[in-house]
Amino acid sequence: MTTLLIATRNAHKIAELSQLLGGGVIVRTLNDFPAAPAVVEDAATFDGNARKKAETLARWLPAEFFSPNFYVLADDSGLEVDALGGAPGVHSARFAAIATDGSNSPDPDNNAKLLRLLEGISPRKRGARFRCVLALTPTSGGQTVCFEGVCEGRIAQAPSGSGGFGYDPLFIPEGCARSFAELGADVKNKLSHRARALEKLREYLWYRR
């Protein structure tokens, strides 16, 4: 059976990815590998950050985990807002950060900064998208393969809903009248950028069986 080491300790991401992956795979996370090195996400693109995380951790794993059926799965994702020239982009998780060590900033702070920057921007000019890149690296050697998913939408004028995480209370997906935070996990997991990237990944793994 295929084993995926999800390269994160973020509880929200782990829950979402595990639910989207469904059955048929064994899921492990960085919580199972407390000595795993921290990877600085300093690439200019989601693809670059996801590849860096996946490949660094695949090289670090002890030899006992080298197997044709064991992969490291790394995700980098974020929000691109048209009125801000694509920002916050790769800096989405630390958009409001004051620290210079690359630490993430709290979700409410990121949301507040986004709303502040969009103050006065009309609803029709608040187009945005969530973008996700998943990088899959085999521990036994071989090339990293990346899968991208995009969810188009717009930024609301105020947060709404208590579900989800990150910018979910502000993001209204295309064709919907409610934010991701209001739609609930079942609906979000059919529409989201991460769900679309994972669908491509599942197809890839299926054809390799």
Image (cartoon, rainbow, N blue to C red):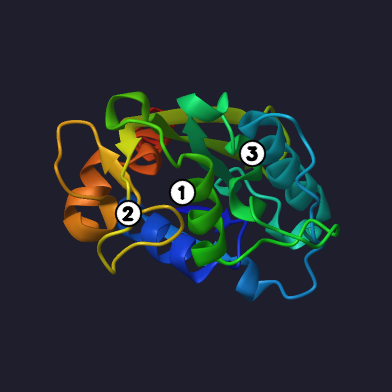
Q: Nearer the viewer, mark 1 or mark 3?
A: 1
Q: Which residue is mark 3?
A: 90
Q: Secondary structure at mark 2?
A: loop
Residue under the point 68% across and 27% down: 143
Residue under the point 43% across and 52% down: 167
Please say if 192 is above or below 26: above
Residue under the point 64% across and 49% down: 67
Is there any visible trace of residue 8 in the rendered image?
Answer: yes
Q: Which residue is mark 1?
A: 115
Q: CA distance from mark 1 to mark 3?
A: 18 Å
Q: Amino acid at mark 3?
A: Val
The quadrant where residue 151 appears: top left
Q: Is residue 195 left or right of residue 38?
A: left
Q: Closest to the observer: 40 or 146?
A: 40
Q: Is label 2 in contact with label 3 (beta carbons under 8 Å)?
A: no
- Disc 3 residue crowd, few under 14, some 14–19, many 20+, Cα 10 Å: many
Q: Position of residue 74 (x, y in %)?
A: 60, 47
Q: Position of residue 125 (x, y in %)?
A: 36, 24
Q: Position of residue 86 (x, y in %)?
A: 55, 27
Q: Position of residue 87 (x, y in %)?
A: 59, 33
Q: Is label 2 in contact with label 1 (beta carbons under 8 Å)?
A: yes
Q: Amino acid at mark 2?
A: Ala
Residue under the point 26% across and 49% down: 189
Direction right: furthest residue: 100
Q: Which residue is mark 2?
A: 158
Q: Secondary structure at mark 1?
A: helix
